[in-house]
Amino acid sequence: MKKQKLELTWIGKEKRPRLEPRILIEDKTLSYRAEADAPVDNGETLDLFTEKEAGANPAFDDNILIQGDNLLALKALEQRYAGKVKCVFIDPPYNTGSAFTHYDDGLEHSMWLSLIRDRLELIKNLMAEDGSLWITIDDNECHYLKVVCDEVFGRGNFVANAIWQKKYSPQNDAKWLSDNHDHILIYAKNKKSWRPNLLPRSEAMNKRYKNPDNDPRGAWKPADLSVKTYSASNDYHITTPSGRTINPPKSRCWAISKTRLMELNADNRIWFGKSGNNVPSLKKFLTEVKAGSTTTTIWTYQEVGHNQEAKKEIKKFDENIVFDTPKPEKLMERVITLATSPGDLILDSFAGSGTTGAVAHKMGRRWIMVELGEHCHTHIVPRLQKVINGEDRGGISKAVNWQGGGGFRYYRLATSLLKKDTWGNWVINPEYNAEMLAEAMCKHMGYTYAPSQSHFWQHGFASENNYIYVTTGTLSNAQLQVISHEVGDNSLLICCKGFIAKADEFPNLSLKKIPQAVLHKCEWDQDDYSFNINVLPEEDDDEDGNADV
């Protein structure tokens, strides 16, 4: 009997946005680097990010902060970063309270599911094959989100549900139970090729190792020599050095054969206690254990911090900006440690207060953050500037010995390429200059934007011999003949306002008119795909667990 595939259904699930792949425009007044002239430019100019700039200074160019709708931003990143992001951390709106005004609860829930599903699908495209996704969420949507993630990533790629203790004391005014934890859903792009890193061994772990017999191999700790899985061949008695006869505990047997026991004993790896009369144990040397420890799925506030600790970290940068549920730097350090190595790329498309980028920066990772709100430049930028200048001594700075350095580029999403004119016709947005138009058309037509310094007709490439040329002019037959001659054995896609020639007259040229060439590729002039959620801030708890009134 064929198994029926079970899926979560909701109102409007079948609808999907036809996203416009926007270009990103750099605001050099907000981009920042650690060099002598810290701001990149004191002027008001905006500049496009081009491929030739990438890699010039990885600590600067590879860190990106984008202000704009995060769904459009994810689409904008897709062409350049598909398959390159090692770790995605997102802290989406939790859909608590009355999330969507004017709609009933059922539709509110459905809208939330659609909004998160659309983002997850783009996130999956951006993730590396050995990448992972970490989502913080509370009980309101966690279990529905789990099913949506199963559909997008495949149920087999679910890794774990970690529990973060976000509050350290109970809420005495809770009507039912005090909500003291959040969930962290963890998915791999491909679970077969992803493994978490080990956590660094703590001093407390190492202190468990002693050396009571002055073994030259160093400190060790005793390990149980018996196991539950019964084997008759390993059920034998052992005579201790003092002459005592010992059998394995009832319903258990020894973990090793009698022959192996004798080999280990000869190597001074079996411990019978100082008197030689104790139940035998196996000596596990500190020098032979793993360099780190495997993490559990319960994360206490003592290990990774709590909401109040995070709020204190945020207030150091701006007393006037309050985030309801910020994430502590130690929590992000845990995620980044498990999911990445130095130099890896991390994405957070719900940047909030900018904790992900700040911690990633201090830990030597590259990062991309997206945030729609004004605090993108009023809070996140100043916070990152302090990190880069080495002035941020809070959070994990001391633990990782952060001294400053690096930088980032600040981008805004460009407006839509096409706008309707007075008569309702789609035309090229007058805000687009020639460079912006060329880059936008490269995205739409699947070309990499890379303007040539020697050939005016090379604005980008799709392969070694396949180029694109974008112009708002109308090209005559004579002009096309000249271009065709220069192109030679290569092939060239020309996107122009019009042309006076037969479309197939030049074998090495393909002619497309703007805007007709892209008119049906996506939905135009749609700027807001945001989570329009109005959530009342949670009441702060004092140290005694009493809610502030």
Image (tube, rainbow, N blue to C red):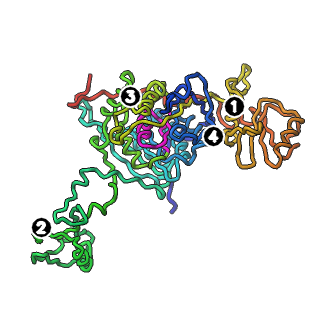
Quadrant in the picture for residue 534: top left
Disc 2 to disc 3: CB gap under 8 Å: no
Where is mark 2, residue-wise? 274
Distance of label 1 from label 2 (alpha carbons): 80 Å
Mark closer to the chain start, 2 or 3:
2
- Front: mark 4 or 3: 4
Q: Left or right: where does residue 483 sit relative to residue 278?
A: right
Q: Residue at x 81, y 39 (%)?
A: 511
Q: Which mark is residue 214?
A: none
Above or below — where is 359 with respect to 417?
below
Residue 258 image position (x, y, % from top left): 24, 79
Q: Which residue type does callout 1 highlight?
A: Glu
- Front: mark 1 or 2: 2
Query: How many labels were placed on the picture?
Result: 4
Q: Left or right: where does residue 509 sit relative to residue 520?
A: right
Q: Residue at x 31, y 45 (%)?
A: 299
Element under disc 3: loop
Q: Which residue type does callout 3 highlight?
A: Phe
Q: Which residues are magenta?
A: 345-370
Hey, which residue is sitting farthest top in the picture?
422
Where is mark 3, residue-wise? 323
Residue 114 visible in this rendered orientation of the protein:
no
Distance of label 2 from label 3 (alpha carbons): 58 Å
Distance of label 4 from label 2 (alpha carbons): 68 Å
Element under disc 4: helix
Q: Residue at x 37, y 36 (%)?
A: 327
